[in-house]
């Protein structure tokens, strides 16, 4: 029984690398803030591997207000969810810095949600669900 517990703890070992990139406008304000996190198996194996990438991007205008936010989580591997793109979220802001539109899709666009905002308040919400017969 001790060997089984040890083998499970050995499979769950992951490495994490984080790359952060910040670009600025000429006036010194942040233009784009991007962060890429990669999680992968510490001891890769052909039959048991895991690779997950998280993209987070925030874009600002020259006054420092948000223009859009983007978050995308993808994975490859033999365990976890069966989809490649786990989450895709895009939020667009108007000139005042309030949310104007948001799109979110989960598990290779099987579940999609689109939201429209006016002055930062939710107006419409539309959900779509796509079935795949494999």
Image: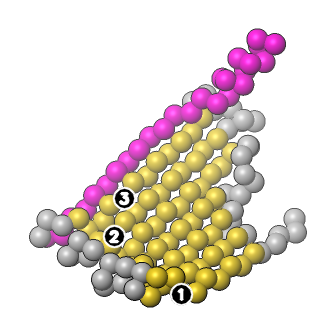
Q: Where is the N terminus found, in terms of image quarters?
A: top right
Q: Which of the two discs, 1 and 3, labels the residue nearer the N terminus?
A: 3
Q: How far apart are marks 1 and 3 (CA)?
A: 29 Å
Q: Where does residue 107 sit, x and y in percent of width and height?
A: 69, 62
Magenta region, residue range = 1-26
Q: How far apart are marks 2 and 3 (CA)?
A: 8 Å
Q: Which quarter of the figure is the C terminus placed in?
A: bottom right
What percent of the width, then of the height, locates residue 65? 27, 74
Q: Where is residue 25 in the image (x, y as percent from the top left)?
A: 18, 69
Q: Which of 53 and 126 is in front in this view?
A: 126
Question: Does 38 appear above or below 92?
Answer: above
Left of 62 or right of it: where is 115?
Answer: right
| Up-down relation of residue 38 to residue 74 (above or below) | above
| Mark 3 surroundings: few (<14), some (14-19) or many (≥20) residues within 10 A | some
User: Does 68 lie within the magenta span?
Assistant: no
Point 78% across, 18% down: residue = 4
Specify the quadrant of the image occupied by residue 31: bottom left
Q: Dot 1: what SS? A: strand
Residue lying at 53% horizontally and 87% vertically, measured from the top left: 123
Residue located beneath label 1 in the image: 123
Please state if 82 lies on the left or on the right of 76 as rendered: right
Q: Which quadrant of the view contains residue 46?
A: top right
Q: Name the residue under label 2.
A: 59
Q: N-terminal of the two: label 2 or label 3?
A: 3
Residue marked by disc 3 = 34
């Amino acid at each position: 029984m001790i060997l089984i517990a040890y083998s499970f703890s050995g499979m769950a070992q992951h490495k994490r690398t984080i790359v952060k990139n910040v670009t600025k406008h000429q006036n010194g304000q942040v233009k784009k803030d991007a962060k890429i996190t990669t999680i992968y198996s510490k001891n890769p194996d052909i039959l048991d591997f895991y690779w997950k990438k998280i993209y987070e991007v925030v874009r600002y205008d020259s006054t420092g207000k948000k223009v859009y936010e983007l978050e995308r989580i993808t994975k490859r591997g033999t365990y976890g969810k069966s989809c490649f793109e786990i989450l895709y979220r895009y939020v667009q802001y108007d000139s005042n810095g309030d949310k104007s539109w948001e799109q979110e899709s989960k598990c290779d666009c099987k579940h999609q949600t689109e939201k429209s905002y006016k002055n930062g308040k939710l107006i419409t919400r539309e959900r779509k669900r796509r079935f795949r017969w494999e």
